[in-house]
Image: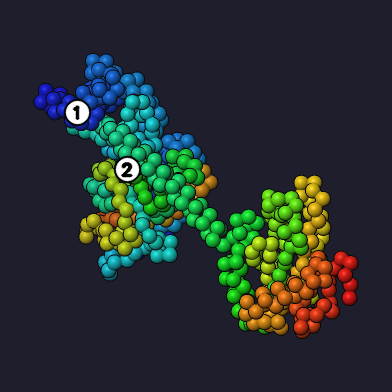
Amino acid sequence: MKISQMKYDILKEVFNIGVGKSASMLSEIVKKRVLLNVPHLELICYENGPVNPLPEAIWKGTLVVSSICFRDKLAGEANLIFPADKMRQFLNLCQGEGQECYLYDLEFDDIDLDIIKEVGNIVLNSIVGELGNFLCLELNYSLPQVKLLSRQEIMANRQNQDYLYRLVLYITFVISDTEINGAIIMDLTLNSLNEIINILDKMEVDLYE
Amino acid sequence: MSSIFSDILNQVDEGIIILDETFRILFWNNFMEQATGVSQDEALEKNVLEVLPGLNRNYFIDSLRQALEKDYRPFFSAGMHRGLITDKAEMNVRGSRYKNADYKLIVIECIDVTSQYVRVNQLKEYVRKLSDLNKELREKEKEIARLAYYDKLTEVANRTLFYNIAEKFINNARRKQEKLGLMFIDLDNFKCINDTYGHKVGDEVLVKVAQILTKSVRANDLVARYGGDEFLILLPGLSDSSHYQKVFSRVMDGVNRVQIAQLPLKVALSVGVSIFPDDGSTVDELITKADRAMYQAKSCGGNACVSYGDCPSGGAVPSHILSSIGLTD
C-alpha cells in the first residue's frame, strides 16, 4: 500500500501535535525546556518480507524500547526507541545529574527503567491519543513496558503477525539544548491502516473540493 | 463497594485510591493509611488533591482527566516525582479508569519502591568505592611505571628508559639516514661539592643540572641520568653535526646562573659528544666514544664540550674545544 506525499504530510502534522503536547508535559515535569518534533515519517509494509527501517550505522548496540499496545477500532503497538547511550544522556538530564556518573552507559537500574516507562508512556499516549482524536476513535491502552533490545530483535519483535504495517516516526528530542534522536515505531494491522487511509482520503478530497 | 472487595483491596501490598469523576475519594485502603498517616475517615469524601497536595500539579490533573475521558493510563515514576504521595516513601503512581453505563471511576495505585532506592543507592555507593579504588590503583600503576623508567631524584629518564629509547632512535636514524647525537655530561668536581657542602646540597645541584639540561633541549630530545653525576642527552634528527654546540651553549648559560642556598659554589660540566653513524653504530659504542671525548674535555680543565670526531687518536689534547672557559684552541 502506498500513500501520497499529502497524506504523509497530514500524518506528520498529527504526530507533531501529539509530540508537542508530550513535550509541554515533560517540560513541566523535568522543569527544563523540552522540545520534540517529528521531522520524518516512513510507512513500511511487511507483505514482502521483513524490513528494518533503522539504519545500522545509527542504531547500533543496545536500544531502549518503551512500548504500549492499543486496541479497539485501531489496533497496534507503539514503541519509543532510543539508543541506550542516548537514553542514559536523557536520563541524566532529566534527573539533573552532574558529570560524575559511576554507572556505565548501558546500565539501567530499576529507577531508570521506571523513568523510561513514564517518558515512553507520555510520548506514546500523546501520539496514539492524537491519532485517536484525529480518527475520532476512543482507544484502549495497555500499561507501558520497557525492554532493552538490539536492532535485530526489534525487527523480529513484531508481537502480532497481523501487524502488517509499520509507521516509523523519526523524532528529535531537545532537552536543555542537548539534541537526542530517537524513533517511534508503530505497528498496525491492515484494517487500522485502512481506517487511517480512509480518513486521510476524505480529508484530501475535502481539501481539493 | 461490597465488603469482600473492600477487604481484598485492604490486604494488597500497594496503595489503592478510588476516585469519582470529581476526584473525590471513594476508597482509601489500609496501605495508604500506613504510608501517609491519613486514616480512611480523614480521606474519604475529600478531594484527592486536598489529601495528597503533592498531586496538585497541572500535568497530574490533566493526566487524570485524560484517563477519565480517553482511558489513558498515566504512570508517574518516583525517580521523576519525589514526594508525590508522601515524603516518607518513594512511590510509583499508576492510574486507570473503570467505566460502566452510569459512572466512571479512577483507580490510583501507589507502589512503594523505597527498597529499590535503598538497593540502587547501595549499589551506586559500592560502584563509587570501586571506582575510587580503581582510580587509586591506576595512580599507583603510573607511579610504579614512573619509578621504573625515571630517576627518582632528578625526575629525568633513567638508564632503562634511556636504552629503550636510544635503540629506537638509532633504528629510526638508520632508516631515515639521519644523524643522532649523544652528549655525555659529567659534573666537574662533584665529589668536592659533596665533601664541602654535604650530600643534600650535592643532590640539589644534580636536580638543578637535570632541570637545566631538560630546558636546554628540544621537545623530542631525551635527557637521562646515567648514574652518579653523569647525564646523557640524545639528539635525534641532527641536521648539522654541530647542533650540539647550541645545546651546550644553552646548558652553560643555565649552569653559570645556578645558585644553591646562597652558597659560593660554582657548577661546571664536562661534555663529550659522539654522533651516529660517524662515531658508532650501537648505543654502547656511542656512549663509550662520548665518554672518551668527555674525558678529553676534563683533561683540559673541564667546563668544556668536546666532540669525539675532533679528538686525535691516542687521546691527545683535542684540537677543538668548545665554549671552554680559559681554554682555547
Q: Relative to A52, does residue B101 appear above or below in the rendering?
A: above
Badge 2 is on which residue?
A: A110
Label 2: how many Cα within 10 Å (few below 14, some 14–19, many 20+): some
* Image location (x, y in percent) of residue A193: 29, 56
User: Which three-letter amino acid code belongs to the residue tagged 2?
Assistant: Asp
In-front residue for pair A180/B116: B116
Furthest-front residue in view?
B195
Query: Which chain letter matches label 2?
Result: A
Please determine if labels 1 and 2 lie on a single subunit.
no
Furthest-left residue in view?
B4
User: Which three-letter amino acid code belongs to the residue tagged 1?
Assistant: Asp
Badge 1 is on which residue?
A: B102
For the residues marked 1 and 2, what is the alpha-carbon distance in whole angstroms? 39 Å
Q: Are marks 1 and 2 in contact (CB under 8 Å)?
A: no
* Image location (x, y in percent) of residue A95: 44, 39
Q: Which type of secondary structure does the marked residue at label 2 adopt? A: helix
Residue at x 35%, y 47% (from the top left corner): A108
Q: Which type of secondary structure does the marked residue at label 1 adopt? A: loop
Q: Quadrant of residue B11?
A: top left
* Image location (x, y in percent) of residue A148: 32, 53
**Image quadrant for the N terminus of chain A?**
bottom left
Q: Relative to A120, does residue B28 appear above or below in the rendering?
A: above
Residue at x 63%, y 77% (from the top left corner): B284
* Image location (x, y in percent) of residue A203: 38, 52
In-front residue for pair A6/B309: B309
The reply to whether residue B199 is in sight is: yes
Q: Is residue A162 left or right of residue A1?
A: left
Which mark is in front, 1 or 2? 2
Dot label at residue A181: none
Q: Quadrant of residue B244?
A: bottom right
